[in-house]
Amino acid sequence: MVVKSGRNLLILPIINAMTGLVGEFEVKLDAKGRFLFPSGLRKQLSPAAQENFMLNKGFEECLTLYPMNEWEKISEKLSKMNLFKPKNRMFYRLFHQGAKQVSLDNVGRVHIPVTHMERVGLEKDAMLIAYNDRIEIWDKSKYFEMIEGNMADFADLADEVMGDLNDDE
């Protein structure tokens, strides 16, 4: 963006607000459970969200990596739950169980603890699936099995989830 300031022109970088992560990225885990964070995915993150993440189990057989700023938004919402209700307490416990803060190392790698890898059967070949405010980490073969197993029902799912989208207008 160019801004005129007196007689001088200032060139300022345009910083886009995160509108949502997107993409599939294949990565390889090394013997220590580290993978190189893809540059194409890193570029989608705001500069403040490119270093620290919260790693948690996902709702299916995957792990979920949240940029720290997104994790803080979720935590803020969850802090409003009525923890006197047993179902709320159980959800809160299950959602946070195993959550661990991770950071990119000086080479740009993320380390996944062995316990997290074992929990979802994550081996050498992995897929990062970025959508909205999170990045799912799947064992590559499990990811494609899940996708193939659900493709036949995709049209029905789209109708159920998206069919009423225009009714609000």
Image (cartoon, rainbow, N blue to C red):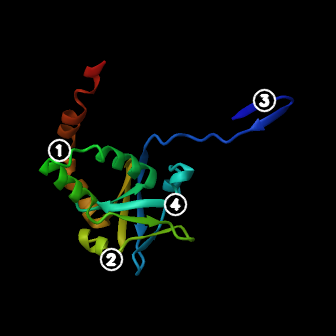
Residue type, label 1 = Asp
Q: Please tell me the numbered disc located at residue 43.
A: none
* Quadrant of residue 64 within the rendered picture: bottom left
- Under tag 4, what secondary structure? loop
Q: Residue furthest right?
A: 7
Classify 91 as above or below 125: above
The residue labelled by disc 2 is 114
Q: Are marks 3 and 4 in contact (CB under 8 Å)?
A: no
The residue labelled by disc 1 is 153
User: For the residues carrying marks 4 and 1, which lies nearer the camera in this image?
Assistant: 4
User: For the residues carrying marks 2 and 1, which lies nearer the camera in this image?
Assistant: 2
- Residue at (50% x, 53% y) in the render: 49
How far apart in space, not on screen, are marks 4 and 1 (Cα)? Answer: 37 Å
Residue type, label 4 = Glu
Q: Residue furthest left?
A: 86
Would you call the spot at circle 2 few (<14 residues within 10 Å), some (14-19), or many (20 or more)? few
- Under tag 2, what secondary structure? helix
Residue type, label 3 = Lys
- Residue at (16% x, 48% y) in the render: 84
How far apart in space, not on screen, are marks 3 and 4 (Cα)? Answer: 33 Å
| Residue 18: image location, x then y, percent | 48, 42
The residue labelled by disc 3 is 4
**Quadrant of the drawing holding the C terminus:** top left
The residue labelled by disc 4 is 51
Classify 47 as above or below 155: below
Residue type, label 2 = Val
